[in-house]
């Protein structure tokens, strides 16, 4: 497991929690509830003192902004699992990794994939890490293939 004292890893955990909450409330409350956990609340719940607040904010904003594009990418690389059938945790982890490593280039793609696999192991189900790894691994192969052709 990843070191829980790494401020960037904690930033991703908090982004995952914020995006899960945002998506859950929008689906189940039709966007009517704008009372969300603040960073300080999540830090207290998770018993963390230090995290990369800028990274958390960038991830959350970018995922919200690019959700349609992200879901198209996920659908392409997970054709056997429609978006609505993917667990919400796995979906948010994939959205974060694709945003961070492929769309916004905040982090090298391989680092984003490694982080996503760790998040899937920590928060997902039994097969989450394999699913996340498969989707992101295929995306990486395609993106590396496109770069080789340039």
Image (cartoon, rainbow, N blue to C red):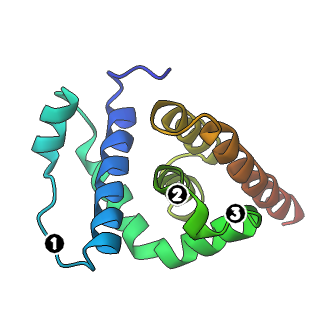
Q: For residue 150, what is the image quadrant?
A: bottom right
Residue at label 2? 91
Judged from the image, the secondary structure of the residue bearing numbered disc 2 is: helix
- C-alpha separation, residue under disc 3 versus residue under disc 1: 29 Å
Judged from the image, the secondary structure of the residue bearing numbered disc 1 is: loop
Give x and y (percent) for residue 130. Answer: 69, 39
Residue in the image at 58% along x and 59% along y: 86
Disc 3 to disc 1: CB gap under 8 Å: no
Residue 38 is left or right of residue 134, and the answer is left
Residue 78 is left or right of residue 36, and the answer is right
Residue at label 3? 81
Check residue 33 in the rendering and tell me which mark sits there, or answer none: 1
Packing grade of label 1 (10 A; few <14, some 14-19, many >=20) is few
Residue in the image at 76% along x and 63% along y: 80
Judged from the image, the secondary structure of the residue bearing numbered disc 3 is: loop
Q: As rendered, which of 6 and 4 lies closer to the eye?
A: 4
Give x and y (percent) for residue 57. Answer: 28, 56
Badge 3 or badge 2: first in the primary sequence: 3
């Amino acid at each position: 497991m990843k070191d829980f004292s790494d401020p960037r890893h904690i930033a991703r955990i908090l982004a995952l929690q914020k995006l899960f909450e945002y998506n859950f409330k929008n689906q189940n409350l039709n966007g009517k509830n704008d009372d969300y956990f603040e960073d300080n609340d999540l830090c207290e719940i998770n018993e963390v003192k230090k995290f990369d607040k800028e990274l958390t904010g960038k991830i959350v904003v970018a995922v919200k902004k690019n959700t349609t594009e992200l879901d198209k990418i996920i659908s392409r690389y997970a054709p056997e699992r429609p978006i609505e059938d993917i667990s919400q945790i796995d979906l948010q982890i994939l959205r974060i990794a694709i945003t961070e490593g492929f769309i916004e280039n905040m982090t090298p793609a391989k680092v984003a994939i490694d982080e996503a696999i760790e998040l899937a192991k920590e928060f997902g189900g039994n097969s989450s890490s394999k699913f996340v790894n498969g989707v992101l691994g295929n995306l990486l192969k395609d993106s590396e293939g496109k770069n080789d052709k340039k």
